[in-house]
């Protein structure tokens, strides 16, 4: 695994504990979302994850938790929901890549969420995803030696994402109150705004976390 991520700028191993390692820490340099203190959904370019290999690993899924905030249906303050998709045959490196895709909203599940508010919001704004469209996995044909950096694939993000903090007071806002959302997301399929032209800046919407 160390060799696989060596020199790969999007995912890096930042620390381990134990011999052999039982705890890993990873840094993701990809675009994801979080909720700012003022209630705005904003973009974040760096994320940190801690993975603890349980005694039953690999039969039992490792315990994964984010050390930085993420606004995503399958993340909460204490864990990352991987149990529904865990298989003993899945390598730890594959899991780390899959969590990176989740952070980038390349993968998400709104049917059994850890964060019902994020699930509701994701269903209403599916047209905005992925937040980061780059390939999260290192290239299979080449693994860079230690000290060498592989080129980062070009990001294909819209200007809307880059202008999150450049909103004027005239922009329409809407509020999603936590109390109005169900504990789990609706089974309805992801929907796209019927009139997207009427809301050219969907990232300017605010939510209220109570």
Image (tube, rainbow, N blue to C red):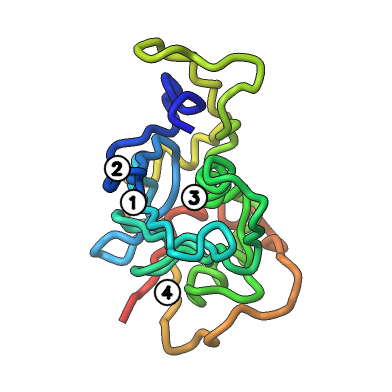
The residue beneath circle 2 is 16
Calculate the distance from the C-alpha at mark 2 to the C-alpha at mark 1. 5 Å
Q: Nearer the viewer, mark 3 or mark 2?
A: 2
Decide: marks 2, 1 in contact (CB < 8 A)? yes
Give left or right: position of 184 versus 80: right
The residue beneath circle 4 is 175
Please name the residue shown 64% across and 68% down the image: 84
Calculate the distance from the C-alpha at mark 4 to the C-alpha at mark 3. 23 Å
Q: Position of residue 52 (x, y in %)?
A: 38, 57
Please name the residue shown 51% across and 77% down the image: 116
- Please state which of residues 192 and 143 is positioned toward the viewer in this rendering: 143
Q: Nearer the viewer, mark 4 or mark 3?
A: 3
Q: Is residue 137 visible?
A: yes
Which numbered disc flags the more N-terminal residue, 4 or 1? 1
Calculate the distance from the C-alpha at mark 1 to the C-alpha at mark 3. 20 Å
The residue beneath circle 1 is 23
Decide: marks 4, 2 in contact (CB < 8 A)? no
Vertical relation: 172 (above or below) 2? below
Which numbered disc flags the more N-terminal residue, 3 or 2? 2
Decide: marks 1, 3 in contact (CB < 8 A)? no
- Near mark 1 (Cα within 10 A), the count class, few <14, some 14-19 or many ≥20, is some
Q: Position of residue 195 (x, y in %)?
A: 69, 59
Number of the label disc, if any, that sits on residue 101: none
Q: Nearer the viewer, mark 4 or mark 2?
A: 2
The residue beneath circle 3 is 103
Which numbered disc flags the more N-terminal residue, 1 or 3? 1
* Helix, strand or loop status at disc 4: loop
Q: Nearer the viewer, mark 4 or mark 1?
A: 1
Q: Position of residue 178 (x, y in %)?
A: 42, 82
* Helix, strand or loop status at disc 3: helix
- Please state which of residues 22 and 7 is positioned toward the viewer in this rendering: 22
Which numbered disc flags the more N-terminal residue, 2 or 1? 2
């Amino acid at each position: 695994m160390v060799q696989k991520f060596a020199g790969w700028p999007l995912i890096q191993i930042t620390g381990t504990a134990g011999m052999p390692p039982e705890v890993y820490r990873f840094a993701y340099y990809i675009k994801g979302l979080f909720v700012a203190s003022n209630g705005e959904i904003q973009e974040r370019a760096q994320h940190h994850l801690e993975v603890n290999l349980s005694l039953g690993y690999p039969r039992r899924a490792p315990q994964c938790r984010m050390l930085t905030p993420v606004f995503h249906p399958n993340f909460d303050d204490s864990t990352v929901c991987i149990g529904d998709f865990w298989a003993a045959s899945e390598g730890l490196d594959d899991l780390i890549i899959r969590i990176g895709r989740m952070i980038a909203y390349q993968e998400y599940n709104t049917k059994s969420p850890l964060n019902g508010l994020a699930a509701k919001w994701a269903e209403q704004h599916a047209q905005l995803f992925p937040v980061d469209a780059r390939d999260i996995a290192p290239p299979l044909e080449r693994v860079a030696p230690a000290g060498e950096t592989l080129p980062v694939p070009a990001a294909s993000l819209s200007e809307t994402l880059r202008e999150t903090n450049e909103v004027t007071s005239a922009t329409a806002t809407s509020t999603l109150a936590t109390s109005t959302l169900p504990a789990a997301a609706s089974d309805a399929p992801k929907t796209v705004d019927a009139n997207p032209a009427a809301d050219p800046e969907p990232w300017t919407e605010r939510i209220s976390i109570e």
